[in-house]
Image: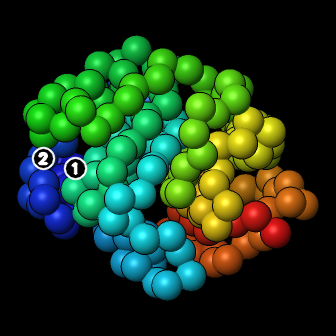
Amino acid sequence: MTRIISGHYRGRRLTVPEGRDIRPTTDRMRERLFSMLTHSRYPAMQDAKVADLFAGTGALGLEALSRGAAHVTFVEKARASLACIKGNIETLKAQDACTLMPLDASILPPAKEAFDIIFMDPPYRQDLVSPTLSTVLEGHWLAAGGVIVCEMATDDTSELPSSLQILDDRRQGQQRVIFLTHA
């Protein structure tokens, strides 16, 4: 079961598609991520513009919305995940604060607006971290002072663009989460 941890939608359950194609960020890891994001070196969640790339169930973006984000843009290409995200948004009655983009997050178009916080949780071990970070930067998706929260496998050895710096690097089980900003 996946649920919203805190905020306006606290305790609300989210639908997760059947099968092994989806690997939602655990409640424990989401709680840890959002606790870290309250640190002053990160953009404020309140009224933030958030992107959730490889959105899966939409849990990260919806957690951000629950905690005060102004708007969340979900990027996902899998049909089952798109239907799941749409259903979760409807369950929370959050349609006005959400945009759903049915795209491959590793090949993004130029951004219409920059985002304060970008969550990025690509499928593990498919070499998607580097190309996605490059397309985020080339498309001007990350706002000045913004942060990218990137989840990957602990054994992922992806090259990070030199124009990004690591603010934090945390590991939990098979998950590694890095917090990145403009260098």
Residue furthest to the top: 79
Q: What residue do we see at 32% from left, 70% from top?
A: 31
Q: Residue 114: horizontal and vertical position, in percent?
A: 60, 46
Q: What residue do we see at 13% from left, 54% from top?
A: 9
Above or below residue 93? Residue 80 is above
Q: Is residue 112 visible?
A: yes
Above or below residue 121? Residue 99 is above
Q: Residue 50: horizontal and vertical position, in percent?
A: 45, 49
| Residue at which label 2 appears | 13
| Residue at which label 1 appears | 2
Q: What residue do we see at 52% from left, 57% from top?
A: 117
Q: Residues within 10 Å of mark 1 (few under 14, many from 20)?
A: some
Q: Are marks 1 and 2 in contact (CB under 8 Å)?
A: yes
Amino acid at pointer 1: Thr
Q: Which of 127 and 4 is in front in this view?
A: 4
Q: Nearer the viewer, residue 13 or 7?
A: 7
Q: Can residue 22 be seen in this view?
A: no
Tell me the quarter of the image containing the C terminus: bottom right
Q: Which of 163 and 55 is in front in this view?
A: 163
Residue furthest to the bottom: 40
